[in-house]
Amino acid sequence: MADLSTVTRSDQYRALGLSTIAFTACFAVWTIFSIIGVQIKEDLGLNETQFGLLVATPVLTGSLSRIFLGVWTDQFGGRIMLPLQMLITALATWLLATVTTYEMFLVAALGLGLAGGSFIIGIAYVSRWFDANSQGTALGIFGAGNVGAAVTNFGAPFLLLAVGWQDTARIYAIILAAIAVLFYIFSKEDPVRVEQKKTGARPATAIKQLEPLKNIQVWRFATYYFFVFGAFVAFASFLPRYYVGAYGTTLAMAGIFAGMYSLPGSIFRALGGWMSDVWGARFVMYLTFIVSLVVLFIMSYPQTSYVVTGIPNADGTPNLIRFSFGMPLWGFVFLSIVLGFVMSLGKAAVYKHIPVYFPNNVGAVGGLVGMIGGLGGFILPIAFGILLDTTRVWSSVFMLMFVIVAISTIWMHVAIIRMDRKLHPELKDNKHLSDVPHERKMQEGTMLAEQKS
C-alpha cells in the first residue's frame, strides 16, 4: 500500500472529479445504441433478436476488456490508461457513422464497446487515493458516472432528431476525445505509481495480479454484479424499445422514461458507497435483492383479461363478466425508478469489498467482477430478444430477471450462513438462531441449574 500521508484533500478531489467526468462520458458512449439502435433497427429491418445482439455487442467488448485493462492499470497507472482507452473508443465511435451493413455495425460496436472498460481503470486509479475507511464513498461517487446512460437516454433522442444518428455518433466521438486530452493534462500520477518510480520497485506481473482469482469469494462478488450492473446496462439499452413497443410512446418520450430509470440507477451509487461504509455491504446487498424481487414480481405480471361466467341474466342469456389487469405506464415508470435506485446501492456495495479484501489487486479482481457483470449486459439483451420473439409477451423479460435475482439471493444467504457457522461453530447445532450464541448458552445453563434445584 502506498503512503497516503502526503496526499492532500485537493489531490483526492482532483482524481475523483476528473475520473468521474471521464467515466460519465464513456458510459454515455457505451449505451449510445439504446437510442440510435432504434433508428438503425428500422433502417435495416432487424428482428428483436438481431436488435438485442446489436445493443449487447458493445457490452461484450467492455466486459472482456476489463480483465487486461485492470491488470495494465495496476502496472502502468490510470493516468496513462484512461485517456488512451478513451481516444481509441472515440476513433471507433467516429467510424461507426461510416458503416452501412448489419455485419459492419456489429464490428463497429465491438470497437465502441471499449468504453465500458473505463470503469475498471477508474476504480483502480481512484482507490489508490483513499484509505479503506473512505474508499466505499469515493468509489460510489466515481460509479455515479453510470449517469452517462441517463445523459444518452435524455439527450440523444433530441440530438438524433436534430442532426441524424450519424452526426450524433460523431458529436459523441469529439466530446470523448476532448475529455481524454483534458484528463491527461490535469490529472496526476497516483500515489502507488509515484512510490514505484521513487523506489524503483517494479509493478507486479500479470500472473501475480491474477492470483486472487482463485478465491471463490471473488466469483461470488461477480455473480452479484451480474445483476446489479449487468442488468442495469441491459435495461438501460432495452427500456426505450420496451416503452415504444409495449406502451406506444414516441422515441423521445421513451428516452425520457428510460432516463428516469438510469438516473437514480447512477447518482445514488454514492449513497450506496456511504451506506456500505456505515452499515456494511452485506446489509446493502440484502436490501437490493429483496426490493428487486418485489418490484420484478409486479413488473412480470402480463397485461391480462379475464372472462367470468356469472349467474345467467333474467332472460336466460349468458352473464359474462370481464376483468382486465395491467400495469399502467405511470406505474411501470415508478417501479423502474425504484429498481434503478436499489441497483445503484448494490453496485456500490459489491465494489466496497474489493479494495478492502484485495488492496494490491484492485485492478485484476475488479476487472473480473466487472467482466462478469458486464457479460450480464451482453447476455441479457440477447436473451430479451429471444424471449420476445418466442413468447410474444413483453413482461417475459422481467420474469427472467425475477428468477435470476431469486437464485442470487438464495445463494448469497446460504453462503453467508455457512461463513457465519464456520466463524462461530457453536451456531451449527443452534436451532434457535440466537444472534448472540454465548448469551444463549448462558441462558440455557441458568435454566438447567434452576430446574435441578
Image (tube, rainbow, N blue to C red):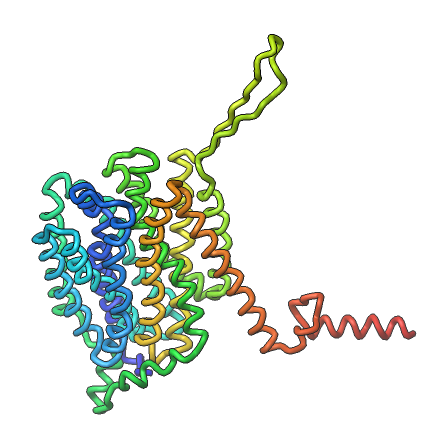
Give the answer, above or below, for where 10 lies relative to 256.
Answer: below
Please determine whether, in this image, residue 325 is positioned above or below residue 272.
Answer: above
Q: Position of residue 402 (x, y in %)?
A: 46, 51
Residue 453, quarter of the rendered image: bottom right
What residue sits 15% from the left and 68% below the top? 83
- Foreground residue among 149 and 327: 327
Residue 176 coordinates in the image, percent (x, y)? 14, 59
In this rendering, position of residue 421 left or right of residue 247 = right
Residue 452 locus on image (x, y percent): 90, 74
Determine whether, in the image, residue 104 is placed left or right of residue 314.
left
Residue at x 31% of width, y 61% of height: 143
Q: Nearer the viewer, residue 245 or 232?
A: 245
Q: In which quarter of the image is residue 8?
A: bottom left
For the question of whether residue 148 can be seen, the reply is no
Residue drawn at x 20%, y 55% as measured from the top left: 29
As drawn, 194 above or below 349: below
Q: Name the residue at the right extreme.
A: 453
Furthest-top residue in this view: 315
**Residue 168 visible in this rendered orientation of the protein:** yes
Left or right: 158 with respect to 326? left
Where is residue 37 shown, x and y percent of the image?
A: 21, 47
Q: Between residues 41 and 432, which one lies in front from this camera angle? A: 41
Looking at the picture, does residue 40 appear above or below residue 69? above
User: Residue at left 42%, top 77%?
Assistant: 357
Q: Residue furthest bottom?
A: 200
